[in-house]
Image (cartoon, rainbow, N blue to C red):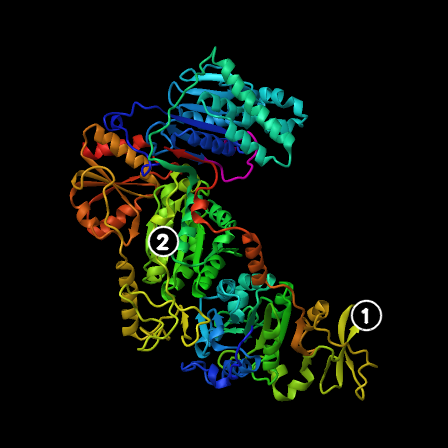
Amino acid sequence: MATAVHQLPPEETSDRPPAESVVVRFAGDSGDGMQLTGGQFTLSTALAGNDLATFPDFPAEIRAPQGTLFGVSAFQINFGSSEIDTAGDEPDVLVAMNPAALKTNLGSLKKGGLIIADEGEFSERNLAKAKYDANPLEDGSLAPWQLMKLNISQLTLDAVKPFGLGNKEALRCKNMWTLGLALWMFDRDRQPLIDWLKAKFAKAPELADANIAALNAGHAYGETAELAGPMKQHHVPAAPAEPGLYRTITGAESISLGLVAGAQLASLPMFFGGYPITPASAILHHLSRLKEFGVTTFQAEDEIAAIASAIGASYAGQLGVTSSSGPGIALKGEAIGLAIMTELPLVVVNSQRGGPSTGLPTKTEQSDLYQAVYGRNGDAPMPVIAARSAADCFDVAIEACRIATQYMTPVMLLTDGYIANAAEPWKVPDTSAYEPFPVKFLEEAPATGFLAYARDEKGARPWVKPGTPGLLHRIGGIEKAAGTGNIDYSPANHQLMTEARRDKVAGIKVPDQQVEVGETSGKLAVVGWGSTFGPIHQAVRRARRRGLDVAHIHLRHIWPMPANLGTLLKGYERILVPEMNTGQLKTVLRDQYLVDAKPLNKVSGQPFRIAEIEAAIDQALA
Amino acid sequence: MNEMTTIAKSTPKDWESDQEVRWCPGCGDYAILKAVQRTMPEIGARPENTVFVSGIGCSSRFPYYMETYGFHTIHGRAPAVATGVKLANPELDVWIITGDGDALSIGGNHTMHLIRRNLDCQVLLFNNEIYGLTKGQYSPTSRVGTQSPSTPFGSVDRPANPCAFALGSGARFVGRGIDVHKNLPTVLKAAYAHKGTGFVEIFQNCIVYNDDVFAPFTAKPNAAPNQLWVEHGKPLLFDNGTKGLAMDTDRLVLKVVEVTDGDWQGASVIVHDQTNRGLAHMLVEMPTGAFPVALGVIFDDPAPTFESAVVAQNARASEGKVANLQKLLGKGQTWTVE
């Protein structure tokens, strides 16, 4: 979602935008390469200058049994010539590579939408696996939609025949054939993809050639088939955008780059301790390739070691970072407490997923807000910030580094599986526009004497690197005396230190809350955080076009909250809080401001649809 | 390290912090603290360059009493914190202080991975076969039948053997000492000299909850017949040279042999080779009672250290690359909007 970069044409503020936007969903077996197809289609769409948002939707199993309903992997992209904030409510086009993919994805397809099905895969066996009694391609049950059945498997085999691949390998080119057809449908350039295939299969040129042949064949099929049948070529013009250099980016990439930028702005090397977990691993993968930026990555033996090593690195003078998802964050809880107690900088990234326990590893949810704000033993306050989109992750990661190093505190950065995997266009920022916040280690005792727990005007204690002569000291998780940091569990001292930790975090300067869309007071404020930005934003804009008095407020700073937020919220008659959990921000808002915030909750593992939020707005104002 | 000037040698006193030591009177920890403070000047360590990292338990209070940098972390996680410290600054001397519960129960996983990675550090495992700070529950090294508040009818699970655990995890240095024994600094010095994880098990007497548990080999009259201080290149003799260890070649196990008039060769007593992993395994696993307890530097065979490999790989991967963030952001397939 490219709010920051895409300009709104005037017609968008009137009614539903007349400019075209199209939602395409590629669905197939998890071995069919649908994520790759979607990713490449995304790239070509971005290169064509469309705004876009994507939604990769895949099973937790790596290769679920072929043809089964639970093994379906899908990739949805919404692209258009106007601002795109979400992956789209209902697909216009569904590409179904087998019966299971058709069955699991048909429900969301727009009535009258186009189904492109690989009839070669609609064998009796596959129909049975998808629990179809009759072949839907034949029995008329698909009448509400336009159906285009092609034997993609056979067409692919024919196309790659000259390259002498085995049957299995040849069929692997199916996704490229399908992509070729899709590229034709939306008038996309094939060349970037051909270049990519050549680079990818540089060591196996016959595979590159076969895939390119399949791609070209799919494209050529489109050209021929246009004469008959429902398939039409669409040209979606480029979206108006601010001038500049663009690329596509996923949340995981964006966070990684933001952390690198944050460490640079702090003038620190970065230490990243991680442990593989879906959907957070991608951050570890990205950072492990960036050694020349002073990044050390460490794949630890478990989640606890991942954070403990990051704390050790921070203690030794680097910017410690760790990353995980809900279950891993739970394991890190005690160590986060240690970082709070020892007042060391640390960035903890939580790519949230459906919970509790293992929950829905590959599906998205925002249900770790309580965990982030409250989820530790003792009075253990820590700042919490949340990213709203893939592009936003970059700035939020920098902000996390800033708060951590300036205030000597661990910071929780919340993102989620949707943001982590989804791609969107990103206007490459100018790094010189970011204000550096270089860390100054204490290297000499002040005239008044060295105190490990002296506090500056922000309440932060000095950061001393081991190796510094004259400043030897000991720290630990046990309660420490104000000032010296020596062990002290006397009642008055614990009271004092608990309050000092609380006040330091409460006093973190965060920017005043702005209103995204709408007035700063009125009938209804829709308040969100994190990846619900897109659907909330679109829903509010649509409602406003219909003349409704509604505003969109989206929080980045969950803890501490912006100083003006309470006053701002009290300026609205009603507050609606859509969240992909059972009402966590809603509860915090009620607690902090005694406002009658009403929840709108969805925990299906799928992002909100615009229509769902729009309906809730209507209901709130009825 | 290349020092331009000679630094005045420190004294044990220089390594004492201003904090009041809070262990129980008579605790073996005092002796270990003194041994460490005595060792530091001799190895030429510098206080500002030394970091003691500990977990939780009686032993883990140790860093507060050393005039160095110190980090008293959380239960079992000292090896992980130490790994981060050493990776962030390989120049630091890192010592891990831990206990039998901390290192082998709650932190067993980290201990294993620290050792297998071979991080350059020293691990001093204070083994008192009991949980002291939580008031006396049996520990993973307690012998079968240990009666404790949590095992009033005696423990039923077999204990872990710290040195065997370390060797099994791939340790390149395994040493053993006794809290009050004069040889402890020698073992500590060897552990420090070893590049890599120097794993030292120290038999430490808990005077309150497990007093005299090691007396069968530490009490004065029991010492000579039950302690075998191994030395590289020297025969494995004990009991004032009247007994030795030889190989039972039929069963491939060690056996105790009598040595008459110092003729250990005649009795086929094995000469200790600290680089012989197989021998080390046999020495640390000798059953108590029938055999003496092997002490000293049991195994010392260095291998490349983890942090040096990480540093080298980071340097290789960065070679010839310029860290240009602006360029990195604009990498990949991009397009320009005019």
Residue labelled with disc 1: B249
Q: Looking at the rendered structure, which numbered label has been put on residue A362?
A: none
Magenta residues, as a range? A57-72
The reply to whether residue B106 is visible in this rendering is: yes
Q: Are the residues under marks 1 and 2 on the same chain?
A: no
User: Residue at 58% across / 74% down in the picture?
Assistant: B192
Judge from the rendering whether residue A565 lies leftward or rightward of residue A612; answer left or right.
left
Residue position for label 2? A400
Q: Is residue A481 above or below residue A32?
A: below
Q: Does the magenta segment cover residue A60?
A: yes
Residue A45 placement, left or right of A609: right
Distance of label 1 from label 2 (alpha carbons): 64 Å
**Furthest-top residue in view?**
A228
Q: Circle 1 — which element?
A: loop
Q: Secondary structure at mark 2?
A: helix
Q: Position of residue B184 (x, y in %)?
A: 59, 81
The chain identifier of the residue carrying mark 1 reads B
Residue A350 location, x and y as percent?
41, 50
Camera-near label (1 vs 2) is 2
- Please give left or right for residue B45 compared with residue A488 in the image: right
Q: Which image quadrant is residue A42 in?
A: top left
